[in-house]
Amino acid sequence: MTHKPHTVGLILAGGRSRRMQGQDKTLLAVRGETLLAHVIRRLRPQVNALALNSNAAPDTFAAYGLPVIPDRLAGFLGPLAGIHAGLAHYPEDHLVTVAVDLPFLPPDLVTRLRAGLDTKTCAFASDGERHALALLWRPGMAASVQDYLQRGGRSLKDYLAVHGQPVRFDRPQDRGLFCNINTPEDLAHAEQDTQLL
């Protein structure tokens, strides 16, 4: 019997939602549920534990019952800062990091990322052209991300070009993984697109 490693899911919601006119995307509703509720419902069956990365007051999310982990590095350095916080908080676990603005995660996301991890620092979902902010990290990778950020790196795409292993998510049912909700228009599209599961 193969041992399955302990895996923590970290939902990334530490940004400032500038393209959403300053509203915290985490609690915006689509199809009758908040974005956070969608991600929790889809990710929880795939991991051993869940946590939320946010720089808002923790009691904002009290109803969801998740540990809230703020960025450890100051200055709103982007999604890698939230990822770093999660890696530092859970140094012995595999960590799955997904953006809160991806409400249509596939049910086999973690299984497929784990199968594709190979020898790289992390595995990430890709359709061959784009990457989704849905990644699986090996334990103990906080120092690698911190070093990149402290040297002035900010681009997740550039980090993944060196340290990441792409895993193909290009089936029709994977389409929702690339539906980022960043703007009011994105929110309206997600509400109306019946092909997004």
Image (cartoon, rainbow, N blue to C red):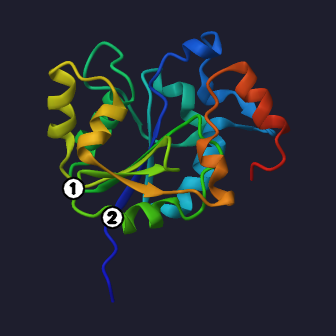
Say which residue appears at 68% left-offset and 59% top-offset.
Answer: 173
Q: Quadrant of residue 81?
A: top left
> Is label 2 in a helix, a strand or a loop?
loop
Say which residue appears at 42% left-offset and 60% top-offset.
Answer: 113
Say what amino acid the circle numbered 1 marks.
Glu
| Left or right position of 93 against 172 | left
| Left or right position of 76 against 27 | left
Report the residue marked by disc 2: 6
| Up-down relation of residue 138 to residue 144 (above or below) | below
Q: Quadrant of the N terminus?
A: bottom left
| Left or right position of 111 against 157 | right
Residue 186 in percent (x, y) is at: 71, 27
Q: Quadrant of residue 48?
A: bottom left
Say what amino acid the circle numbered 2 marks.
His
> Badge 1: how crowded within 10 Å, few (<14), some, or many (20+)?
some
Say which label, 2 or 1, has the lower sequence index: 2
Report the residue marked by disc 1: 92
Residue that sits furthest to the front in the current view: 129
Q: Are marks 2 and 1 in contact (CB under 8 Å)?
A: yes
Residue 119 in percent (x, y) is at: 21, 61
Say which residue appears at 20% left-offset and 46% top-offset.
Answer: 141
| Left or right position of 80 against 26 | left
Residue 195 in percent (x, y) is at: 80, 50
Alpha carbon of mark 2 to alpha carbon of mark 1: how far? 9 Å
